[in-house]
């Protein structure tokens, strides 16, 4: 049986590094818009929000933020197949990236993946809104998976079609007390950095969160990303063919 990446690398707690960096995260922004369609006033929206909030899992005890954008990933386990570094039985992980476009490449992949399994949508156009925001991360328990001894395992850690090795690595990092980690994005062709955070206590927001809003139009061949505030950012496209592996759209195995 092949040893896990963590075991092969022989990492100890004394090998953890201190790290202070900025991370960008992108989330869907449609929930409140959808709720406005169900009620007639802002007051009713607030009541509906409170009812929904009471039905959700509790906020993690180690969360000190008042902003739902920050603590939401820690509140839920990952989806049916887990996430890249999280098994479906584990608490969720906060994922982000060093730059905006990298995180969009990660997010848009799952939109195209959903369409692959939805014949009725595969050739339709879909519009939705997303919100991006930036936070500071400060921790003394960080692991950089882009450096030695992990760098030689990049193909397994950032495999475009498998979570098998990365989920095992994620579980072992979590059990060893790692708070944050850096890795190469699985959805970009270069060496773009993505981040994972295990605990909200390492997220710092001294000056609050600045949010930017985006319109995403998904077509069969590409996603078009346009900022609502056109004075800040430029429109860009992400093509479906960018994700192909050996001519096929990659489906995750776990």
Image (tube, rainbow, N blue to C red):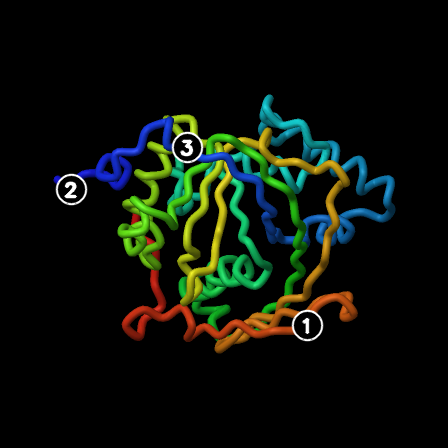
Q: Tell me which numbered mark, 3 or 2, is placed earlier along the sequence.
A: 2
Secondary structure state at the residue bearing disc 2:
loop
Instruction: Please tell me whether mark 3 or mark 1 is closer to you in this view.
Output: 3
Side of 151 relative to 60 (left or right)? left
Residue 182 spot, x, y in % from top left? 45, 46
Label 3 crowd (10 A; few <14 / some 14-19 / many >=20):
some
Residue 199 spot, x, y in % from top left? 53, 31
* Distance of label 2 from label 1 (alpha carbons): 46 Å
| Residue with the mark numbered 2 | 2
Q: In this view, does 169 lie above or below 103?
A: above
| Residue with the mark numbered 1 | 234
* Distance of label 3 from label 2 (alpha carbons): 24 Å
Label 1 crowd (10 A; few <14 / some 14-19 / many >=20):
few
**Residue depicted at x 31% and y 75%:** 247
Label 2 crowd (10 A; few <14 / some 14-19 / many >=20):
few
Secondary structure state at the residue bearing disc 3:
loop
Query: Total of numbered circles in the picture?
Result: 3
Query: Of the numbered discs in the image, which one, if any, rests on residue 107?
Result: none
**Residue depicted at x 68% and y 53%:** 29
**Residue depicted at x 12% and y 39%:** 1
Residue 35 spot, x, y in % from top left? 73, 48
Residue 57 spot, x, y in % from top left? 58, 29
Instruction: Please tell me whether mark 3 or mark 2 is closer to you in this view.
Output: 3
| Residue with the mark numbered 3 | 16
């Amino acid at each position: 049986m092949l040893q896990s990446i963590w075991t092969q690398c022989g990492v100890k707690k004394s090998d953890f590094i201190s790290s202070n960096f900025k991370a960008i995260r992108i989330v869907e922004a449609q929930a409140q818009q959808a709720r406005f369609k169900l009620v007639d006033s802002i007051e009713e929206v607030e009541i509906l929000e409170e009812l929904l909030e009471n039905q959700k899992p509790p906020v993690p005890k180690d969360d000190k933020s008042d902003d739902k954008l920050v603590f939401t990933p820690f509140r839920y386990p990952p989806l049916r197949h887990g996430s890249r570094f999280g098994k479906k039985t584990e608490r969720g992980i906060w994922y982000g990236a060093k730059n905006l476009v990298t995180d969009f490449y990660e997010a848009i992949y799952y939109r195209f993946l959903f369409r692959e399994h939805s014949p009725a949508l595969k050739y339709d156009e879909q519009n939705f809104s997303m919100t991006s925001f930036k936070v500071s991360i400060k921790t003394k328990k960080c692991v950089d998976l882009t450096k030695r001894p992990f760098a030689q395992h990049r193909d397994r850690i950032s495999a475009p079609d498998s979570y098998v090795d990365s989920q095992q690595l994620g579980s072992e990092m979590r059990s060893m007390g790692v708070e944050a980690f850096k890795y190469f994005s699985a959805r970009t062709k270069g060496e773009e950095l993505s981040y994972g955070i295990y605990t909200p206590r390492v997220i710092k927001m001294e000056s609050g969160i600045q949010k930017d809003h985006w319109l995403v139009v998904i077509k069969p061949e590409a996603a078009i990303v346009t900022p609502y505030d056109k004075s800040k950012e430029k429109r860009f496209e992400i093509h479906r063919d960018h994700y192909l592996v050996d001519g096929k759209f990659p489906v995750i195995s776990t």
